[in-house]
């Protein structure tokens, strides 16, 4: 080989200064937008949690499992007790209201019957359930307004009211009030109407009548006036004799002796003639029964004062019966008997 051939051979060799064309690398794979990872692993390190294949869950404590049913039963028992207590409270309140209203209505009915006036009763604060057990009401306050001067006005207090089969008994009663004379006139008119209706229906005999008709025995009271100075009552009445009405005037005086009320005849006349004692006594008996119902027969009069419009009184009594007999069968407004009730 000649020297000329050397350069060509050398040019065929790789020139260390000549640039090499870099080999093209494959494009990187695209990453997904979300990359799921398991709970407990680090999402940034890509490490997965290591689970011991020999790990086993510890067994539950038998004592803990036994306490859970007991706790559940305790909650159920507590709720049941609360429900029972709530039912008892509701029943107690309902019974209290029922007994209180029933007792109040009974006593109001009784005193309304006795006075002929609208009466109200206020009971004691003692629970009615205890009163029901003992069958005794400690005390009540009675107020009858008198119906604007048309009936008996009564204000008082009754203590130790006990229940009976035919009514009630007042252990004690202290009361004050007044009776208007208009009550006597009204009862006399009702008695005359009742007596006349009985005679027309044939249920009663001539000269005999019951109820209001028997109060005045055929007399009709026209007016009653009072004289405060003398303490007397002047009564103008009419009696029918042989179909002829005859006016009768009587002056009587109420007298309290040892707590009992009686009436004395001061003067009696018919026209210009005197009235027989029997006629005068009939008027006295009618006035006595119309002024005060039979309830006052068991009371002691502490005071009785005659006024121009009626009589004022103060009474007191013990073991006073409150039944059909003591309340009386005559009424100012209806003229009929009223049924009595028993408290508690």
Image: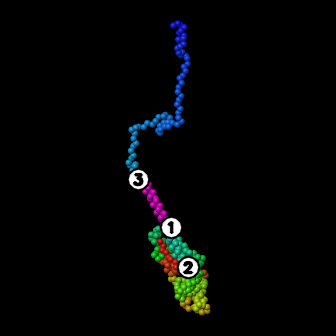
Q: Between marks 2 and 3, how big is the CA–CA gap?
A: 70 Å
Badge 3 local density, few (<14 within 10 Å), some, or many (20+)? few
- Is residue 210 on the magenta stretch? no
Q: Is mark 2 on a helix, strand or loop?
A: loop
Residue under the image location 39 percent in, 44 percent down: 59
Location of residue 232 in the rendering, given as x and y in whole percent from the top left corner? 58, 85
Residue under the image location 45 percent in, 60 percent down: 84
Q: What element carries label 1?
A: helix
- Reading the image, the residue beneath label 1 is 97
Q: Earlier in the sequence, mark 3 or mark 1?
A: 3
Residue under the image location 47 percent in, 64 percent down: 91
Compared with 65, 254 (above or below) is below
Residue sitting farthest toward the bottom? 273
Main secondary structure of the magenta stretch: helix
Q: Which of marks 2 and 3 is nearer the N terminus?
A: 3
| Residue 184 shows up from this direction | no
- Reading the image, the residue beneath label 3 is 70
The magenta region covers: 73-101
Location of residue 147 in the rendering, given as x and y in whole percent from the top left corner? 58, 76
- Reading the image, the residue beneath label 2 is 334
Residue under the image location 54 percent in, 89 percent down: 206
């Amino acid at each position: 080989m000649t020297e000329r051939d050397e350069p060509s051979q050398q040019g065929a060799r790789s020139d260390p200064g000549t640039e090499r064309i870099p080999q093209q690398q494959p494009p990187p794979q695209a990453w997904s937008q979300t990359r799921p990872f398991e709970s407990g692993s680090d999402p940034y390190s890509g490490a997965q949690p290591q689970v011991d294949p020999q790990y086993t869950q510890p067994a539950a404590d038998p004592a803990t499992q036994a306490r859970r049913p007991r706790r559940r039963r305790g909650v159920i028992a507590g709720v049941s007790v609360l429900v029972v207590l709530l039912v008892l409270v509701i029943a107690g309140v309902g019974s209290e209201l029922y007994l209180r209203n029933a007792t109040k209505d009974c006593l109001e009915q009784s005193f309304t019957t006795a006075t002929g006036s609208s009466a109200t009763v206020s009971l004691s604060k003692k629970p009615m359930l205890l009163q029901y057990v003992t069958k005794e009401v400690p005390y009540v306050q009675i107020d009858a307004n008198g119906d604007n001067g048309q009936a008996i006005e009564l204000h008082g207090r009754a203590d130790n009211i006990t229940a009976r089969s035919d009514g009630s008994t007042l252990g004690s009663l202290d009361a004050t009030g007044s009776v208007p004379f208009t009550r006597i006139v009204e009862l006399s008119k009702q008695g005359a109407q009742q007596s006349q209706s009985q005679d027309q229906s044939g249920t009663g005999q001539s000269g005999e009548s019951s109820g209001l008709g028997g109060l005045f025995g055929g007399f009709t009271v026209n007016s009653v006036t009072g004289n405060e100075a003398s303490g007397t009552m002047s009564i103008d009445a009419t009696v029918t004799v042989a179909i002829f009405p005859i006016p009768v005037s009587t002056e009587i005086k109420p007298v309290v002796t040892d707590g009992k009320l009686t009436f004395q005849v001061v003067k009696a006349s018919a026209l210009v003639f005197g009235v027989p004692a029997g006629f005068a006594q009939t008027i006295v008996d009618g006035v006595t029964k119309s002024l005060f119902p039979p309830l006052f027969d068991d009371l002691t009069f502490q005071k009785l004062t005659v006024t121009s419009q009626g009589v004022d009184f103060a009474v007191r009594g013990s073991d006073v019966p409150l039944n059909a007999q003591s309340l009386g069968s005559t009424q100012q407004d209806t003229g009929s008997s009223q049924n009595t009730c028993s408290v508690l």
